Amino acid sequence: MSFLKIAWFEYRRRIRSKWFIIGTFGMPFLILAISLGTGYLAGSGAGLETKHYGLIDETSYFGEKLQSALSERYAERDIAPLDIAVSNGTFVELRAQYEDLVVEKVLDGYFVIPEDFSLNPNLRNYSRSSSTLKSADVIESELKDLLIEDRVARHDLPETIIADLWFDLDVIFYEIGSGEERENEALIADYVAPFIFMFLLFLGIFTGGQLLLRAVLEERSSRVIEVLLSTVSYNDLMGGKILGLGMLGLTQSTIYLGAVILAGSYFDLSILTPTITILYFTYFILGYLFYAGIYIGVGALFDSEQEAQQAIQIITFIAIIPMVLWTLVIENPNSALVNILSYVPPVTPFFMMIKIAVGETTVFQVATTIMLMLACVYGSIHLAAKIFRTGILMYGKRITLPEIVRWLSA
Amino acid sequence: MNVQAGRIFGFLGPNGAGKTTAIRMLMNIIMPDTGSILFDGSDKRPAPHLIGYLPEERGLYQKISVFETLQYFAHLRNVQAADQKIINMLERFDLVSRKQSKVNELSKGNQQKLQFINTILHDPQYIVLDEPFSGLDPVNQLLLKEILEEMKQAGKTIIFSSHQMDQVEKLCDDVALINKGHMVTSGTLSEIMSSQTNRQLQVTPVSELDLNHKYFLTRNAEIRSGSAFIQIGDENKQQLISEINALIDIRSIRVAEPGLEDIFIQLVTGADQ
């Protein structure tokens, strides 16, 4: 039972460490602070600057209307994101003057409303860079509305019909079965919750993995490994470490899941169902064990943390794929790409977690991915044990790839 | 190589000779390619709690306290009433006031003492020490020797490697010398000391001018510190003394027995050649 003693030692010494406590409890606050902070910054207009454009209006009609529409649009903002200076005239007359202003950086660019704009609605833009694109979108949208208004007016329709033509369309969301209308919070939670589960899984697995790597390197560099190996077997030592630090990752995940439940109950939402909880812990354990083998194997090969971290970077890079593709998985959980990626072991737990949280998976997919992960966990731990046994005592020796291959095939 | 129970065995060899590798094989940390290690005639390794091992370098967690370090290893080795035993040991080694200190806050010597406590806390039958005197001041070296003597009296089997030949000479009953992975010599300390033939005659003449005497030249004597050192090998020393007395006016003459260090150097150099 030595591995249980080792597991308890690893768990106990790290759970009391101030960095673990700060990291675990500080992380949600940090994420909240960053979200609120960036939200506030975005809302406050800090970091924004007004872009100045010229507008050559060959119609001598739409330019001024556009100017007032933009003033109305940004009436409540301290800083308007864009400002236009309108000149009625022709492109041929005014072009040279505007080009100079753009070159001298007085203007960010200029637009041209051609004379036949009503019949042939094309807007021209001349600018230095692509930073005009967003402004062009706003101007395009406002001009489109103005053009519709103008066309409607030209048909001489009664005011009531005109008022009737302008309306806002809303989609109202209902629950299947209960038929109850869904609140906005529930809709947002449905969209974000799968990401949260995937992120927590990621955090728990890689926190445990990183700690495992450091624990192996610490024992290797301080030579404690020799005293330990004279007392316990390789398997007990490796097993104890994996268990202890896995429990630590699990503790952290449980704390975060608890926070998610609390946050959900505040908004009267039940984000975490028993099925999701069970599958969350299942994929956590499988994902952690899979990566534990890799982290232990790498830890046993290097003397310094710097070298080991460089080697592990490629693994972390692969695991970041779900973090990049999460919106794709939420919006297309059954696309061929997502289904294929769900069977790629390094990312299987993360993709499956999103699919489960979205509710777009089958019992077959869950069962087969669990079996796949079980096989990969066996392989990963088995190979890690071979590397650990041979490499852990090779201090100061640069281990080559052919050597590793030889150990693995032994 | 045969280590007898209840004795202190000195395991010697120059740097890179393979001492640490042999010790690691003994500790079952690495497997020998050839050969075998038997304990009391059996190739079954004794249970971990019967063995105490002190590695050559550090071997301690740096960021946990002295007390926790000892507690963890005691727990792994199923030591009963461990806390009290830890306190007793810390008191004996004058470390009790540092029991809550982190290991990396201790001096090198104190870390070595802590490591030694960790090696013997579980009262093992076999004690394997790789350079145990490293980093210890003379007072603590004496304390360590005292404890090793006590353990020997208690019937423990002690194996230790060291470069400090004076310690080996004072402590060991048996010695083995290896070089480049091969055995050069082994046996009881007295056997090895007496088997060496490189005894010298130290001759101090009344006048230092006599150090240039042609007798010393013909004998290839080494001249240092006002004396001439003549290799005597198996020669009859009484006959030699009479011979020298007849030729040179002598203040003193004595047989200089080689120390273990001299034997070590001679054997290693001889083995290399």
Image (cartoon, coloured by chain):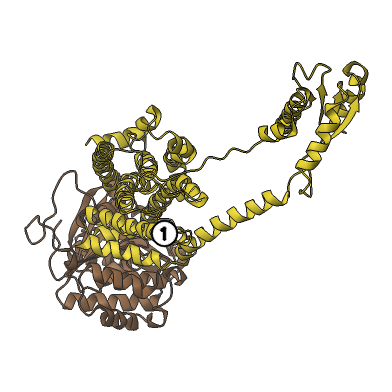
Chain colours: A yellow, B brown
> Residue B96 appears at what percent x and percent y?
37, 82
Q: Is residue A211 left or right of residue A77?
A: left
Q: Is residue A110 left or right of residue A346?
A: right
Q: Nearer the viewer, residue B61 or A360?
A: A360
Q: Is residue A268 left or right of residue B175?
A: right
- Going by the picture, which residue comes out furthest to the left? B41
Q: Quadrant of residue B87?
A: bottom left
Residue at screen point 33% across, 50% down: A276
What residue is pinned by disc 1?
A261
Q: Is residue B153 left or right of residue A253?
A: left
Q: Quadrant of residue B228?
A: bottom left
Is B89 situated above or below B107? below
10 Å neighbourhood of mark 1: few (<14), some, or many (≥20)? some
The amino acid at mark 1 is: Ile
For the question of whether residue A318 can be seen, the reply is: yes
Q: Disc 1 is attached to a residue of which chain?
A: A
Q: Nearer the viewer, residue B31 or A315?
A: A315
Where does the N terminus of chain B fall, quadrant-wise?
Answer: bottom left
For the question of whether residue B252 can be seen, the reply is: no
Is A160 situated above or below A188? above
What secondary structure is found at the residue carrying circle 1?
A: helix
> Residue B2 appears at what percent x and percent y?
13, 59
Where does the C terminus of chain B fall, quadrant-wise?
Answer: top left
Residue at screen point 79% across, 26% down: A127
> Residue A281 appears at what percent x and percent y?
31, 52
Q: Nearer the viewer, residue A150 or B25?
A: A150
Total numbered labels: 1
